[in-house]
Image: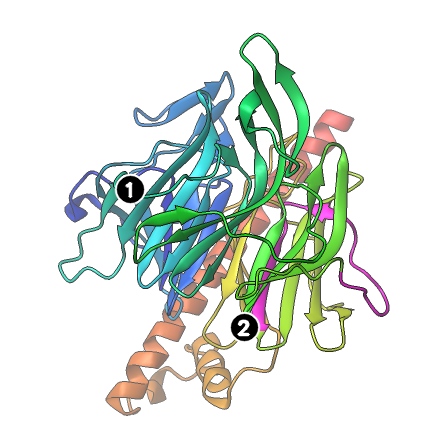
Amino acid sequence: MLLLSRLREWDAPWSRRPKASKRPRSATVRELCLGRVLIAMREWKREERKDRNIDSIEDNEVYLPNDEIWTYDIDSGLWTMHLMEGELPTSMSGSCGACINGKLYVFGGYDDKGYSNRLYFVNLRTRDGTYVWEKITNFEGKPPTPRDKLSCWVYKDRLIYFGGYGCRRHNELQDCFDVHDASWEEQIFWGWHNDVHVFDTKTQNWFQPEIKGGVPPQPRAAHTCAVLGNKGYIFGGRVLQTRMNDLHYLNLDTWIWSGRIPITGENPKHRSWHTLTPIADDKLFLFGGLSADNIPLSDGWIHNVITNCWKQLTYLPKTRPRLWHTACLGKENEIMVFGGSKDDLLSLDTGHCNDLLIFQTQPYSLLRSCLDCIGKNAIILESQISLLPPKLLQQVLKKITFWTAANHREEQRAQKEETENKYQWISNN
């Protein structure tokens, strides 16, 4: 299943959930993986303010409700919405979410009141099916300064945060901070970070590790990260008007930076708002983002950390760009991409997405291939399906539902694109 939430919590009973066939509204999202469950938090989009529980940012921008969690069943392809309880996190964009030991943690973000350094969590493995947010206030140590668009590595019961864009007071300025703007009257500075902060989920303790060596990456935000073994990888991101395509890793045991990793062969384009997903012990999958030319990207690359080579996947569709989306690994090493935008949301922002893209990185198992074949041809095989053993029959029925839902959504998407093209043609002529 796939869990989708927005950056608030959920304060209503489960009996209010809508039909499972509906999909969450389009928005930028944050998404994580918990076993067979995918977790994604919706953040904001541009639209008229119509819902009573949607908070306004500007005249045509809103933070979407934060009291929802959406689950996506990977086998049947159906969405279900639930509502949650507890200390709801403030509706924000650019927050950083991570799952560890069955708990979802959400840190930082930005709203119309400024940047945040608050940390919340919710237990996703409750026995009674009730999800309750809690704000972490009884902690030791000093948390990071307020920021958004940062990244997080999960390693040994620890949440390890890197970078982001945010604010500091004059007495908090350090070499890890690249100043972008300042309010001299209030002595507040805004800019990009490259510092590392750790939250130990067992001891509830914040600390900043001593970096023992190596050259750290340049301060940045809207980058992406991934963990392979004991190494936390960083790729790309933005500082000032520069987007990057450099790859680094931090040894999460020794706290030594690798420096910029030399690449053999072709490099992906410079970008921000992309995703980097581990797909094997030695491979990372890079997808999408916004290029240095402000062009939404639809390319996918696999990086081999042993040979330090990038390989572009040329079979991915070029007509489905994504940025500020989310991605996680499916049950058979497929990449599942949800939400985000299909255009430059800094200037246009009309293309928030709520469709799920699935990219294969290796052949499916024989069982999966057979189930898909039956699901796609259910009408032809209708008289024989009921003869299957009960356990296999349940799997087949879910696949039939999956492909029925998938075909319906593809028809809806095609109709929407056709309508948009007609309007565009009319406006141009």
Instruction: Give the number of callouts.
Output: 2
Residue at coordinates 75% horizontally, 42% vertically from top-left?
243
Q: Which residue is mark 2?
A: 229
User: Which dot marks residue 136?
Assistant: 1
Asked whether residue 413 appears in the rendered view, the answer is yes
Q: Nearer the viewer, residue 320 or 428?
A: 320
- Three-letter amino acid code at the position of disc 2: Gly
Locate residue 111 relative to residue 255 in the image: left or right.
left
Name the residue at the top extreme.
185
Q: Nearer the viewer, residue 88 or 134?
A: 134
Q: Is residue 149 above or below residue 62?
A: below
Q: What is the span of residues highlighted in magenta in the rendered image?
A: 261-279
- Three-letter amino acid code at the position of disc 1: Ile
Question: Toward which corner of the image does residue 155 lie, by quadrant?
Answer: bottom left
Q: Is residue 310 magenta?
A: no
Q: Is residue 134 above or below residue 372?
A: above
